[in-house]
Amino acid sequence: MPIHNANLLVREARLKAGLTQEQLSEGICTPQALSRIENGTENVSHVTFQALMERAGAQYGRFPVFNSRDGFECFYGLKRARLYLDAWQLQAAYAELNKLEEKNWADNRLYYQEWLLLHCRLQFLSGCCSHQLNYDTLLDALHITRPGIDLADFPECLLSQNEIQLLTCIAQEALYINMPSLCRKICEQLDHCLTGSTFALVEKERMQVDTSIVYVKYLIGTGDYGTALELADFNRKKSAVNTYDAPLIELTFLTGLCCQYLKNYSQADTHIKAAFYSAQAIESCYATLCREFLMTKTDYRITGSMKEFPTLPLIHYPSKNFQESVQVTDGLYEATTDSPYTLGNLIQDLRLEQKVSQQVLCHGLCSKSKLSKIENNMLQPDVALVAALLERLGQSGKIFPYWGNRKDAEFYDSYFKATHHRTMPKEIFKKNYNTKIENLIDKNDTLYYQKYLINTAFQSNSADERLQRLTKALSLTLPGFDIHQICSYRLTCEELSILNNIAHEYRHTKNSHLSSLYFLQILAYVQKTRPDVLMQSKFLPVTGYMYSRSLYMLKFYQETVALPGSFDISIMKYHINSYGMFLFFYCQALGESSRFEETHMTAIQAYAISILTERSTNASALKQYLSDDFTIELKY
């Protein structure tokens, strides 16, 4: 069912939750507007539909439509700003948020609410904010949808993700303006709300981790260092497995801080330095804040390279407080007079703007006839297909929080667990997750079957067999693929990931020269098609790490050292685990090129990230390599 006939979905979700129209609509729209939505006489924008479905606790929804192209651009721009903030790329986040203000938030107050939330996050991360102003702005933003909320008593509220994130940030700011009891009450209630929520696993666990950071800070403030250490260390390990980079660095620092207060100085040193050098490696001002805090608030001894490593200066960004005068609406529009802007419209517009033919876009995914029907709104695409089409047009297909149906939700939750299984024995991982995925799909679910084949390819111990399985997975959507003609194709994230892995596996075979060929062709594809940063961040960090490893293992040291000039190396910093692996080989190539000072500085960063991401074996190996090969002692 297309979302522009959302009346039945909203009404069904409301009745299932046992809510009145007044309860469901509170702060989102008027009860009268909700009545018109349910009667099908008024249409609803994606972000408003999402808020209503989240308020009702619905487990899944349908793919969205927007009321305009600006609506999509605001939705996508907010996702891009989140990426920048998670990577501490604050200047890029600030520029992105300014663009959304210029679009007047697509005339939607829910986009305005999220924009205020992200601006307050920017202020906090910069280390230059007024905590009282941030607190007031966050509270005003929350009141956009929750005007009557009692911060000390909201456990029965059905909260949206933005509302949960606003409350998390409010709790954090409450600590800084000397309201610790309010911070504790908010955190305890959020824990209750999230435990019983129906959010997708990846979204739910990230929000739980973010809330844990605030509660750890509260516990440290009360002197309960033992409980704080237990909570910080548990969520630090979870973040390492789930690759939540931003909270991982902060939780690692907090873990070290608790160890310092408990006089476990060796562990304190390990975690504090891992957080500091990792933050410095990705050019985050968090390194500056860490060092200043240690120097002024603790008796921690700053030694070795930690004294000498340059940190970024703190930059003040103009604050954006809530304005009553801002003119934005509820995101509703007349169903009979206004045409919705569907994903079909978006796909067609992007395709024409990029001068991509239907044949190239749909190759291996669907027929031209089916694509035409999608573009002309005669057919509602399924979740996997629309994501693949968007990715072939350079947009991330992984940005929508609602999966198409219960089966889609179960598949993606299981797939997330299966791809983050580092802490589990292989046989348990296979039994619990891959078997569940296998039972959810059949071979006609081409795009899901492709994901399944990729996952199972690495159960083999033979490089040739892994290559065979990966090639089979690629052929499902790219039959007859020719690596030499890569720039004549349009590729999904999954296809690019397969090509990454094929290139990586070739280094173990008699055709090892093909490894470099594949990686070079992937970089050529990126250079020609220029995918959006949200899409690049999903595959390019892995390309950089795998390519550096391949070149180094083939003893192409000069080529390894030259890699940062081959593509936008800043993208690597959006995925700290891949960046750490890149630095692992890059620093050794620097050593082989007799650039020993750079070798040492880069090795410290690589070592720290290995500790941060729970890869202590890599850290020990690197330390040994430096000593054995270059007589360099790591001054950590």
Image (cartoon, helix red, strand yellow):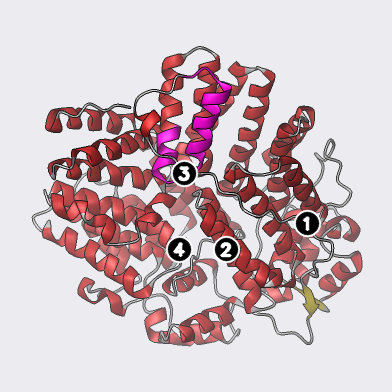
Q: 507 or 137, which is in the foreground?
A: 137
Mark in front: 1 vs 4:
1
498 lies above or below 478: above
**Residue at the (61%, 62%) spot, across then down:** 97
Query: Is residue 615 at all visible to an observer of this figure?
Result: yes
Find disc 2 in the rendering and name its residue: 96
Mark 2: which secondary structure? helix
- Asked whether 294 falls inside the magenta stretch, the response is yes
The reply to whether the C-beta atoms of the residues labelled 4 and 2 are less than 8 Å apart is no
Q: 15 or 597, which is in the foreground?
A: 597
**Mark 4 neighbour density, 10 Å: few (under 14) some (14–19) many (20 or more):** some
Find disc 4 in the rendering and name its residue: 533
**Distance CA(mark 4)–CA(mark 2):** 12 Å
- Start and end of the magenta stretch? 275-300
**Distance CA(mark 1)–CA(mark 2):** 18 Å
> Which comes before the other along the chain, label 3 or label 1?
3
Residue 292 in picture, x, y percent from top left: 53, 31
In the current view of this chain or complex, which residue is farthest to the top?
263
Q: Amino acid at mark 3?
A: Leu
> Which comes before the other along the chain, label 1 or label 4?
1
**Residue at the (69%, 43%) spot, across then down:** 169
**Distance CA(mark 4)–CA(mark 3):** 23 Å
Q: Amino acid at mark 1?
A: Phe
Mark in front: 3 vs 2:
3
Find disc 3 in the rendering and name its residue: 312
Find disc 1 in the rendering and name its residue: 322
Mark 4: which secondary structure? helix
> Which comes before the other along the chain, label 3 or label 2?
2
